[in-house]
Amino acid sequence: MSSVATWPSQAESWLDQRGKGAWIAAMVLSFILFWPIGLALLAYMIWSKRMFFNGCSQSRRTHARAFGFKSSGNTAFDAYKADTLRRLEEEQQSFESFLQRLREAKDKMEFDQFMEERARTAREETASDNA
């Protein structure tokens, strides 16, 4: 009975070892044999994101490491990279705080303009009531 419960996970790992091509072949074959199974397999492939990565069991963290976030083996270069990334993060924080100050200044200017228009309207209403 336990072998019946484990065959889907065994099939999944077998297909993962062979890559995306094996998943696609299984999907096409299942469409040919019985289309609802092919449709279910396609939905599973999309839901589990097997259609969108080169490696079937590749996570986002593994994907990020493939783009330069791992050690090069050279300590001098790794130190330079870490320093550069730290400096860029500081620059990004400075830029974001600059943008925040800009937004706050714009908000204050718009609020002051609103208050001035409101005061002017109140003065005009008072002057027309007195006349």
Image (cartoon, rainbow, N blue to C red):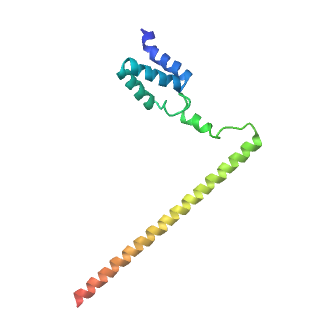
* Left or right of 9 on screen, residue 88: right
Task: Please state which of residues 44 and 64 is positioned toward the viewer in this rendering.
Answer: 44
Q: Is residue 44 above or below residue 77?
A: above
Q: Quadrant of residue 33?
A: top left
Residue 103 image offset from top left, x and y in percent: 48, 64
Task: Please state which of residues 20 and 111 is positioned toward the viewer in this rendering.
Answer: 20
Residue drawn at x 26%, y 83% is 125
* Left or right of 53 on screen, residue 38: left
Q: Quadrant of the N terminus?
A: top left
Residue drawn at x 42%, y 11% is 4
Residue drawn at x 46%, y 21% is 26
Residue 107 image offset from top left, x and y in percent: 44, 67
Q: Quadrant of residue 47?
A: top left
Residue 31 image offset from top left, x and y in percent: 39, 22
Q: Residue furthest front?
A: 32
Residue 77 image offset from top left, x and y in percent: 74, 44
Residue drawn at x 35%, y 78% is 117
Q: Is residue 94 above or below residue 74?
A: below
Q: Residue furthest bottom?
A: 131
